[in-house]
Amino acid sequence: MKKPTQLLCAIPLLVSLLAPCASALDQATALPVATASGSHEQLAGNIHSQVNAYRQSLGKPGLKRNAGLDRLARQHSEFMRRNRGKFGKGSKGNITHFGFEERSMMAQRGMGMSDVGENVATCSRTARPANVLVEAWKKSKGHQMNLKGSWTQTGIGVVVDADGTVFATQLFDNIDHSHMTLTNRMRSF
């Protein structure tokens, strides 16, 4: 049997040896994620207001912002910014729904959401990016379906690149507190 004093001396030595490895691992694996700067959050708020005004003009209720969905949307907008130009040719090469299934699962299992929808867009060289983005979504049949959908929650993430290009993601969702949803969620563990 080892004496407790030997063990107590060995623990700090072990920690001091492994600490540099842990910090190197964090630096090597950490991915930059957009932070919600004031101007980006203001732009997300403008998009939210315009989407709600559009929905209300159609007799639909406004959407409530959800902090968890905002975070997922911001992360995806940052992903599009970091990988711009890699998704195809022209301006469509800057946007993608890549990873939507994972975002949907995170919203469903981690936040108790039911159905999930997503709109993505980008624009540049405009004084009113929120207007341009929402108008583009309104003119696209698939995006318009999301704008008009029977959602209750939304998350909006906006990232602006150094050249002024705006990347936006809007997630749509519903909180589902039904017994079957909770039962199915528990079965997945």
Image (spheres, rainbow, N blue to C red):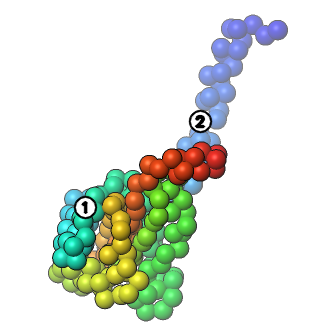
Nearer to us in this view, 94 or 107: 107
SS assignment at label 2: helix
Mark closest to the chain's N terminus, 1 or 2: 2
Q: Which residue is mark 1?
A: 41
- Packing grade of label 2 (10 A; few <14, some 14-19, many >=20) is few
Numbered mark located on residue 104 in the image: none
Q: Where in the figure is residue 180, as x and y percent of width and height?
A: 54, 50
Q: Which residue is mark 2?
A: 19
Picture quarter with the N terminus: top right
Residue kind at label 1, given as amino acid type: Glu
Side of 185 where 173 appears, left or right: left
Side of 9 where 108 appears, left or right: left
Nearer to us in this view, 128 or 149: 149
Determine which quarter of the picture holds residue 155: bottom left
Determine which quarter of the picture holds residue 151: bottom left
Residue kind at label 2, given as amino acid type: Ala
Q: CA distance from mark 1 to mark 2?
A: 36 Å
Mark 1 and 2 residues: CB-CB less than 8 Å, in contact? no
- Packing grade of label 1 (10 A; few <14, some 14-19, many >=20) is some
Q: Where in the figure is residue 55, as x and y percent of width and height?
A: 24, 73
Residue at the image point whose x is 29% and y is 58% from the top: 65
Q: Is residue 77 above or below residue 186?
A: below
Nearer to us in this view, 122 or 2: 122
Can you name the residue that lies furthest to the front here?
A: 179
Can you name the residue that lies furthest to the right here?
A: 1
SS assignment at label 1: helix
Residue at the image point whose x is 27% and y is 79% from the top: 134
Whether residue 132 appears in this view of the structure is: yes
